[in-house]
Amino acid sequence: MRLLVLGGTQFLGRHVATAGLDRGHEVATFTRGVSGEPPAGVRALHGDRDDPAALPAALADWQPDLVVDTSCQTRAAARNAAAVLGGVHGYAFVSSLNAYAHWPPGPIGPEDDEPTWTSDEDEYGPIKADAERILGAALPGRFLTARAGLIVGPDDRVDRLGWWLRRIARGGRVVVPAALDQPIAVVDARDLAGWLVDLAAAGASGGVSATGPAGMTTFGGLLDLVREVTGSDAEWVPVPEQELLAAGVEPWQHLPLWLPAEVARTAWDVDTTRARALGLPSRPLAESVAATWAWLQTVDQLPPPPHGRPSPGLPAELEKQLLAAR
Ligand SMILES: NC(=O)c1ccc[n+]([C@@H]2O[C@H](COP(=O)([O-])OP(=O)(O)OC[C@H]3O[C@@H](n4cnc5c(N)ncnc54)[C@H](OP(=O)(O)O)[C@@H]3O)[C@@H](O)[C@H]2O)c1
């Protein structure tokens, strides 16, 4: 079938394009063409999806059967896609757990019990929730929205796991949160990508929380894997939450993936029964960590994180100060 990837030149979208080729689909990507080109064998269509004229022009000679939409970040982008792509056989949309009105902090139970945002705010979660409604109305019974949790894997320029890999690879004393037994869950971009293509091809519909099984690992379990994969001699220097916060360490940003206990207790508690029933794979975390490390070593200079976000990581001064105190 003809698969259109909205996005498709970076991280998740790039894996979607590759998964489409692997499954024998004819694949095209639609991007502005400013941050790279798709994998070989993929037709590169160009335009800005916020411009209502762009998709109709790009698709004048190439009509897709399936869509996987990884790049929707505005309501206009959703409206423009809905106006043109309502006739496809299956449309798999990449949303976020942030579309849920109660996440964070969660917990997130079965999808049908969890309201999504209904708000005009120009914020990530409300925009994703509105985009789901706009596209869902145009594709009754053929619109699948995957509310993704934390995505990891090669090509990840958001660089959260990447920062830990590079820091731990340098070795020595490494500041870590004291609550290393905190459960966390992630999804590998390659698992998510293949699954999205398969669900679009199946014409699947509905909302699904798309992340790894709750409790699949702990913060400490992940960091131990990172130490193992990088062959590092790093020594953990556990710092209690109150000290991290008092020193000005920003959760999630300065110590990527770290959340204060009060939020973490529920934020990582997401019911993924439907995702598992729909066949979302969850490869061993060691494989994801090893592949991300292998990819990082091929990259001279990481591109900046998407959507104008600052690069994650503990500023050197803060690290020095925290290490000097113990
Ligand atoms: N990372 C996580 O942990 C996480 C968690 C939950 C959900 N998500 C969601 O997962 C998705 C990740 O997608 P991704 O990794 O493929 O990267 P992404 O950064 O969301 O999308 C980048 C792709 O979209 C294209 N693009 C950006 N703006 C565009 C525009 N105005 N018109 C046309 N194309 C445009 C880019 O190419 P050009 O720059 O060349 O246009 C690039 O191919 C996102 O929807 C994100 O919200 C991520």
Image (spheres, rainbow, N blue to C red):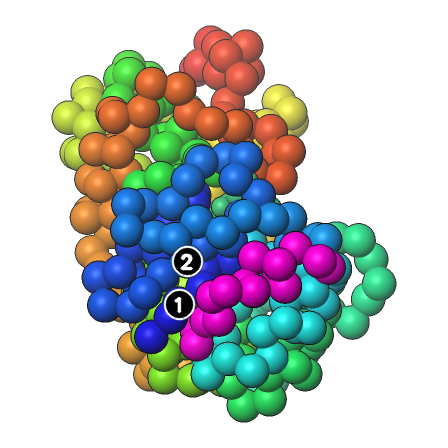
Q: Residues within 10 Å of mark 2 (few under 14, many from 20)?
A: many
Residue kind at label 2, given as amino acid type: Ala
* Quarter assignment of residue 224: top left
Q: Residues within 10 Å of mark 1 (few under 14, many from 20)?
A: many
Please name the residue shown 54% across and 48% down the image.
46
Camera sees residue 42? yes
Q: Secondary structure at mark 2?
A: strand
Viewer-proximal residue among 195 and 83: 83
Please give left or right for residue 83 compared with residue 69 in the image: right
Please name the residue shown 43% across and 45% down the image.
9
Q: Is residue 172 above or below residue 48?
A: above
* Quarter assignment of residue 311: top right
Q: Most extreme residue toward the right, as rendered?
A: 120
Is residue 33 in the magenta section?
A: no
* Quarter assignment of residue 172: top left
Percent x, y of residue 197? 36, 69
Viewer-proximal residue among 85 and 271: 85
- Magenta-tinted stretch: 52-68
**Dot placed on the residue nearer the N-terminal end, 1 or 2:** 1
Q: Secondary structure at mark 1?
A: strand
- Check disc 1 and report the residue beneath it: 3
Q: Is residue 266 above or below residue 275?
A: above
Please name the residue shown 56% across and 82% down the image.
87
Residue kind at label 1, given as amino acid type: Leu
Q: Most extreme residue toward the bottom, as rendered?
A: 141
User: Where, quadrant-wise, is the N terminus in this rendering?
Assistant: bottom left
Disc tally is 2
- Check disc 2 and report the residue beneath it: 28
Percent x, y of residue 213? 35, 67
Q: Is residue 78 above or below residue 155?
A: below
